[in-house]
Image (cartoon, rainbow, N blue to C red):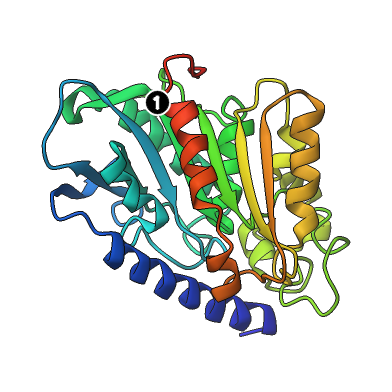
Amino acid sequence: MNRSTALLRCMFFALGSTVVAASAQTAVPSERILRHLSYGPHAERNVLDLYLPAVRGPAPLPVIVWLHSGGWYLGDKGNGGLARAYVARGYAVASINYRLSQHAIFPAQIEDCQRAIRWLRAHAGDHGLDPTRIGAWGTSAGGHLVALLATAADKFSAAADDPHRHLSAAIAAGCAQNPPTDLLTWDAQALPNPSVVAGAPDSMVERLLGGPLAERRALAERASPLRHVSANSSPFFLVHGDADRAVPPRQSETFHAALRAVSVESTLHIIRGAGHVGDVFSQGMPHAAIEDFFDRHLKSATARKP
């Protein structure tokens, strides 16, 4: 196990502990949970958990899709992450598994995420969901996938065996914490003494791409949300620690600037003194601003629909 892998594994489990603790504190006794719903053919990884208010109201629910962290090679849907608390705010939350890099290299991960969103749209009527009001939220590797959902909805073709391939995989809004947004500039933007080196042999990035970054530049560009930004991108909310030595803060800063340059709404919240995970980052999370962001884009009568 190389240094980057070992450090990421420690960070992932630290984040996982924080999320589980937060979920336990914000658990809603009246929620209804549908676990391990299959959305695709890869049995263990193409499943999602759906968290719903216990009492189904007359209006369809806006949806937040939660995408887990783990460097694209660790993690699972867990307990719904930070999004779980939004059930009490009148949302449905879908927490999904997607194939990890040991199962298949990129673009399998984004293809799974898009397939899950198409499944949610196809089954919206079964669960009281609003298929026009779906957003996504993720951290680290999950944030990278959220950023791709927001910028590249039409850049990855649905599989021929997807019965819902005619439906859109676009999202109405995305929120990401510490996301990689440009694999090709990761190392050049790194802070001193980085804990993750994208171009190192067997790094999480090279695992995602299936080989050396230097030899897979075209695939790395395709996997970089920054390279897909356009005026059609979805509104975005970014959170990053300015002391993040795993994913450089410049990854969020350049992504934010690119979105703003084409007049797409983007908010960037920098947490001073925060690394990739930890108490400083958790305490600096702008929860009220994120709530307002999702409410405006998923609940407002004037919200743009994808």
Residue at (43%, 21%) from the top-left corner? Answer: 300
Whether residue 103 sits left or right of residue 203 in the image: it is left
Quickly name the residue at label 1. Answer: 299
Toward which corner of the image does residue 175 lie, by quadrant?
top right
Q: In the displayed image of the protein, which residue is found farthest to the right?
A: 188
In this picture, residue 291 sits left or right of residue 189: left
Q: Quadrant of residue 270?
A: bottom right
Q: Is residue 188 above or below residue 193?
A: above
Q: Residue at x 58, y 49 (%)?
A: 176
> In x, y percent, where is residue 226?
75, 40
Residue drawn at x 73%, y 25% as measured from the top left: 230
| Circle 1 crowding by C-alpha within 10 Å: few under 14, some 14–19, many from 20 | some
| Amino acid of disc 1 | Lys
Q: Secondary structure at mark 1?
A: loop
Residue 147 image position (x, y, % from top left)? 61, 41
Question: Would you say 200 lies left or right of 130 here?
Answer: right
* Residue at image coords 44%, 32%: 295
Residue 221 visible from this viewpoint: yes
